[in-house]
Amino acid sequence: MSLESVRAERIKKKELLESRGIAPYPSTTNRTNTIAEIYSKFKVLEKNKKEVTLAGRVMVRRGQGQILFVDFKDGTGRFQAVLKQDVIGVDALSFFEEVVDGGDFVEFTGTIFATGKGQESILATQWHMLAKSLLPLPDKHHGLKNEDERFRKRYLDILLNDELKELFKRKEQFWASTRSFLKDKGFLEVETPTLEITTGGAEAKPFKTHHNDFDTDLFLRISVGELWQKRLMAAGFEKTFEIGRVYRNEGTSPEHLQEFSNMEFYWAYADYKDGMRLVHDLYTTLAQEIYGKTKFTYKEHSFDLEDEWIEIDYVSEVEKQVGVNVISATEKVMKDKLSELGVSYEGHNRERLTDTLWKYCRKNISGPGFLVNHPKLIAPLSKSQTDNKDITQMFQPIIAGSEVGRGYSELNDPIDQKKRFEMQKKLLENGDEEAMMTDNEFIEMLEYGIPPTCGFGFGERLFSVFENKSLRETQLFPLMRLRQQ
């Protein structure tokens, strides 16, 4: 049957329910237990024969005539209902067969027992419709046909894939464990604005919106309040962090998203070395608490977080892999090398060329390790090294060929910060849409003073690496293009 024909038949069943005075979408249910609760005390319930009511979505129907077996799910588990004619009655069984389809939400009242094959079940004495589905669920074995359909109908994708559901439970634990770790270390959780007059804390093209009351353009934030949390350091807070959504108006790919969750912390009286030690402990703790292991595989990479974390010198690593010193090489030399490597790039300024060369190199590093000594040009918010002003006190955890975080000894010299903002402003004016905007109020705050501070942030990429999945696959509802009408 066509989908339209199936839907028409189900509408007739809905109308049949209504003709008998039965609400196809009642507001309440008589459920007494979840399926998980039934499993946890099955033996006791089976022994005392106490009547219970369970509810859930019908997944499979089997049998005919005098007995039906119905598999249903309620969000906590999957269970079996047995409808026997001599128990539930001829009319009730017949009406169930007539109006109930896969996908319907139904409640069953009865006693708990095990079938002859040992299957935990409820022997139904009555049933009630909770919600009549008008469209059929996809076939279990074929599922949804392609990635686009799975992401658009994520609710069905998760319903039919218990492993995917468990992934999102782990993702919740990932952020919960991050939060717990930082609070145990004395960090205060804060909330900072998501609408900003100027974006800061990262280099990315922002989304623009308009504030009608103020009649001014605003931007959705591209970092989790970096410039705001530094203001909190000036306010006298010692340790703060925030977990929240950020927005970047960049290309779509399995590894790039326009909206995702990040965490950033700021730690007064600490430097990037302190941050590296804390991040090492954080990542190892997350791996052990969520997965019970430290060894992982992501694409062609394997790594063990309990191995020694090597320090990877930015300039030396690029020169070792591709033969270009990004500090001394001309822009022409960098462009020629990228062309030779067959690497496409956006933007022709030195910062973008440097970053593109590094990104080519990073995919060859399995880690674990910390990338250090970044050129100042690509780290506009980081302190310079005391013995070399051209490189900075910045660090990035590198695992499985990916950058899975970024931290600094934060730049707190207002004069130096203003110069770097001016450099970024020139990049913006020359067409670099990812360059950082100048924030004069932030510079004013720095002139009042903030202590030496370490800042660090990471996002969902770390979780996707742990899961060996693309970033889009680890999103509940990834943004999709509008369908063509």
Image (cartoon, rainbow, N blue to C red):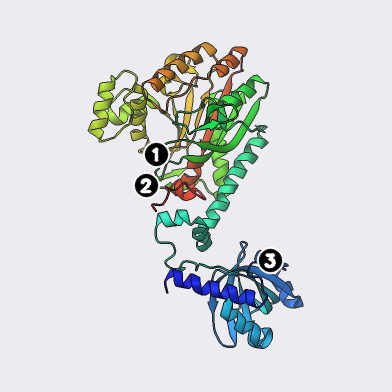
Q: Which residue is mark 1?
A: 251
Instruction: Using a 10 Å C-alpha cutoff, classify the residue at mark 1 as few (fewer than 14 neighbours), some (14 to 19) or many (20 or more).
Output: few
User: Dividing the image into 4 quarters, which one contains the N terminus?
Assistant: bottom left
- Tell me where residue 257 appears, x and y as whole percent: 45, 41
The earlier-in-sequence mark between 2 and 1 is 1
Query: Considering depth in this image, is 418 or 238 the residue closer to the camera?
Result: 418
Q: Which residue is mark 2?
A: 300
CA gap, disc 3 to disc 1? 47 Å
Amino acid type at image mark 3: Ser
CA gap, disc 2 to disc 1? 24 Å
Amino acid type at image mark 1: Gly
| Circle nearer the viewer, 3 or 1 | 1
Q: Which residue is mark 3?
A: 40
The earlier-in-sequence mark between 3 and 1 is 3
- Tell me where residue 211 appears, x and y as whole percent: 56, 30
Tag 3 and tag 1, C-beta contact below 8 Å: no
Determine which quarter of the picture holds residue 319: top left
Q: What residue is rendered at 66% in x and 25% in y?
A: 238
Determine the secondary structure under disc 2. loop
Query: Considering depth in this image, is 458 or 252 the residue closer to the camera?
Result: 252
CA gap, disc 2 to disc 3? 41 Å
Determine the secondary structure under disc 3. helix
The earlier-in-sequence mark between 2 and 3 is 3
Determine which quarter of the picture holds residue 318: top left
Instruction: Using a 10 Å C-alpha cutoff, classify the residue at mark 2 as few (fewer than 14 neighbours), some (14 to 19) or many (20 or more).
Output: few
- Tell me where residue 420 appears, x and y as whole percent: 46, 16
Q: What residue is rendered at 43% in x and 57% in y?
A: 149
The relative height of residue 243 versus residue 329 in the rendered view (above or below) is below
Tag 2 and tag 1, C-beta contact below 8 Å: no
The relative height of residue 255 versus residue 11 in the rendered view (above or below) is above
